[in-house]
Image: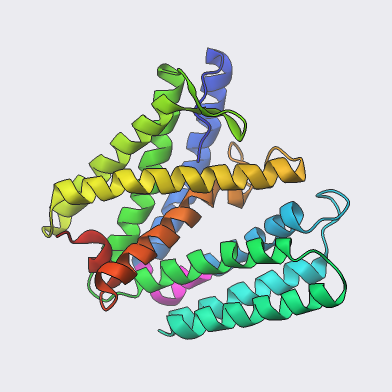
Amino acid sequence: MVEDAVHPITKAGSDLKTRVLSAVVLAPVALGAAWAGSWFFSALLAAATLIMAWELTRLLYAAHGPQTVGFRDAAGLMLAGFAVIVLATAGLPGAALAAGGAVLAFALAGRSWNGRSLFPALVAYPYLVLPLIALIWLRNDPQLGLAAILWLLATVWAIDIGAYFAGRFIGGPKLAPRISPKKTWAGLIGGMMGAAMVGMGTSLWIGLGSPVLLALIGVGMTVIEQAGDFFESALKRRAGVKDSGTLIPGHGGILDRVDGLVAVAIGAALLALLHNAAHPGAGVLIWP
């Protein structure tokens, strides 16, 4: 999620320009892959998995600072990510979850045998694997899969944009200064407003369900998205780094860009599982 603190005007303008240029390049790729679906969508997730696995290893596994990244730890994460992508895309989300759990168990056994801390693996594997399964499972819904993914992406983007501008122009009290000192309550409210508008618009677009209820779902997703942002900020603070990487100008690494998406994808999948597991797209979008 974007930082929503108020900075000097010149710095803010330069920062905004960089972010916009990055979004202009990346958003069409994400939307195109989501629209194509199937293995095209999975190919994009596989590419992201390579970088996310490396950044997670840098944040969680490095014993002597983020520069000392072990290839074996990163390779284990990549293997788990690729395995769940293949199985989930083939329509086997349960098998994908089992495969991810098996690789995690193997990694934990190896770390325990060598007397290494289990914490990095316990965090990294679910953080990488669960959103991959969630996104593919939602997209594979033949009826509303595309709409669900577009709603999910648009919601996360609307939260970021709403938080960015509300935080810069309104400012005010900090949300959680010890974890992420630049987040404000105004930014959170701005994000909620953006997510609510996307929810109402999506419901009207598909012509099903209640726009008001889907708007409220969007408000709830804002809280989940913010929690995902705080969690990644805590990982960076633990590793002693400002950004998870330097791949995306204006955003840092892939994890800096998708921290909110990771949390919202898992939250949306859990919601669909509880509401309508047979048709996950409808389980997310159609209320009541």
Residue 208: image quadrant is: bottom left
Q: Give x and y (percent) for residue 155.
A: 34, 47
What residue is shown at x 82% (from left), y 56% (from top)? 62
What residue is shown at x 58% (from left), y 77% (from top)? 100
- Judging depth in this view, the residue of 262 and 144 nearest the camera is 262
Exactly how many numbered labels are in the figure? 0
Query: Is 70 in the magenta?
Result: no
111 over 284 or under it: above or below? below
Determine whether, in the image, residue 133 is placed left or right of residue 240: left
- Identify the image's colour scheme: rainbow, by chain, secondary structure or one colour: rainbow
Residue segment shown in magenta: 36-44
Residue 33: image quadrant is: bottom left
Q: Give x and y (percent) for residue 140.
A: 35, 75
What residue is shown at x 51% (from left), y 48% (from top)? 228
Residue 207: image quadrant is: bottom left
Q: Does residue 165 appear in this view?
A: no
Q: Give x and y (percent) for residue 240.
A: 76, 40
Q: Does residue 3 appear in this view?
A: yes
Q: Give x and y (percent) for residue 237.
A: 70, 40
Query: Is 43 in the magenta?
Result: yes
Determine whether, in the image, residue 102 is placed left or right of residue 288: right
User: Which quarter shows the C terminus?
Assistant: bottom left
69 over 82 or under it: above or below? above
Determine whether, in the image, residue 252 is placed left or right of residue 110: left
Q: Main secondary structure of the magenta part?
A: helix
- Judging depth in this view, the residue of 13 and 145 nearest the camera is 145
